[in-house]
Image: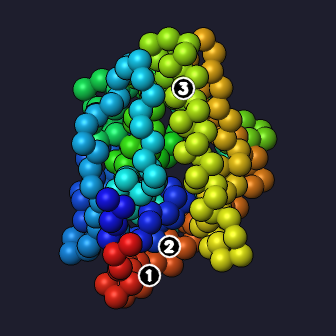
Amino acid sequence: PDAVTGEIPDSPFSVSDNADTPRQRFGTGRNRKKPAANTNVEPDQTVAQSESNTNTNANVNPPISSDPLSSVEINKRPIADLGNSINALKDKGPLNLESEFSVSGKGRLDKDGRLDPKTFRYGPITGQDENVVNIVKDSIEALNEAGYLAYIKDIIGKELGFVLAQNTENLEATFQTDLANDSLAKQRKSSLDLLISIAKSRKQGVNASQNDKDDLVLLEGVQTEVVGKTLKIKFVVPKAIAHPMIQRKLAEQAAEMKKPNGVANTANSNDTAAK
């Protein structure tokens, strides 16, 4: 119990690490050639998998472990690939990442907390720039493949819906799921709020890294709400804050690709320790 090998995963904004698990795209985004990657890389961490999949509308609140954030294994390679792809587009010509868009989708999560390609489908999609819309779809797939949705797989109901949107002022993401009844929705909200609180506590302090600070900005913008039996999760970040963060991470990824090995920076094996 509580045995973790390696560093605790960073956020979707951290693209410096690499993992050896190949990408498993669900085929709905834009096809793009992936950059070369080092296949002899140790995963970020090795963790025990959940004993059972509780992604159902059960009438009990799923148990929250003493360290729920460390029970998820994150594969950083899809995020690194995404950064390389965006940088490649930027090199070809002007790319306005701040253009307006709205991309929606819906699907079930499998036992590993990833969108099942058999059930996933995109909904209405609008956008001023086709390249940016394709980047948003690629981002959804990268976050899914990396495993970030596994953090909430035991909290949501049978299906997860989302809308990612950008307007003149904000970058927003809204997720929602229907539970069996109002009471269960309120219980799951309490579990989610606890998870967010734990995550926030880990991103604070005088020794917080830039990645931690970026994560905290995102977490501070999270709102949870219950409407009947529907649980809603909404992220709102002003563009004036989000885009400098994005550009910084893209620049960091571009710098990593210029290193002699030509792949995302990987932690030295001496930095790995059992916790």
Look at the numbered disc 1 and give the secondary structure of its residue: loop
Locate the C terminus and report the quarter of the image it occupies: bottom left
Quarter of the image holding residue 3? bottom left
Task: Give whichever of discs 3 and 1 has the lower sequence position.
Answer: 3
Between label 3 and label 1, give the one nearer the viewer: 3
Please state which amino acid type lies under the numbered disc 3.
Gln
Q: How many circles with numbers are drawn on the protein?
A: 3
Question: How far is disc 3 from disc 1 in space, using C-alphas?
Answer: 48 Å
Residue bearing the label numbered 1: 258
- Type of amino acid at the residue the image marks with label 1: Lys
* Gap in angstroms between the C-alphas marked 2 and 3: 43 Å
Of helix, strand and loop, which one carries label 2? helix
Q: Which residue is mark 2?
A: 254
Q: Secondary structure at mark 3?
A: helix
**Whether label 3 touches label 1, CB < 8 Å:** no
Residues at discs 2 and 3 in contact (Cβ within 8 Å): no
Characterize the local packing of mark 1: few (<14), some (14-19) or many (20 or more) Cα atoms within 10 angstroms: few
Image spot of residue 162 (x, y percent): 52, 29
Q: Amino acid at mark 2?
A: Ala
Mark 2 or mark 3, whichever is nearer to me: 3
Please name whichever residue, 119 or 134, is drawn nearer the observer in this view of the structure: 119
**Which image quarter is the N terminus in?**
bottom left
Task: Kindly identify the residue that appears in the image at 34 percent across and 66 percent down.
Answer: 4
CB contact under 8 Å: marks 2 and 1: yes
Q: CA distance from mark 2 to mark 1?
A: 7 Å
* Any part of residue 155 in sight: yes
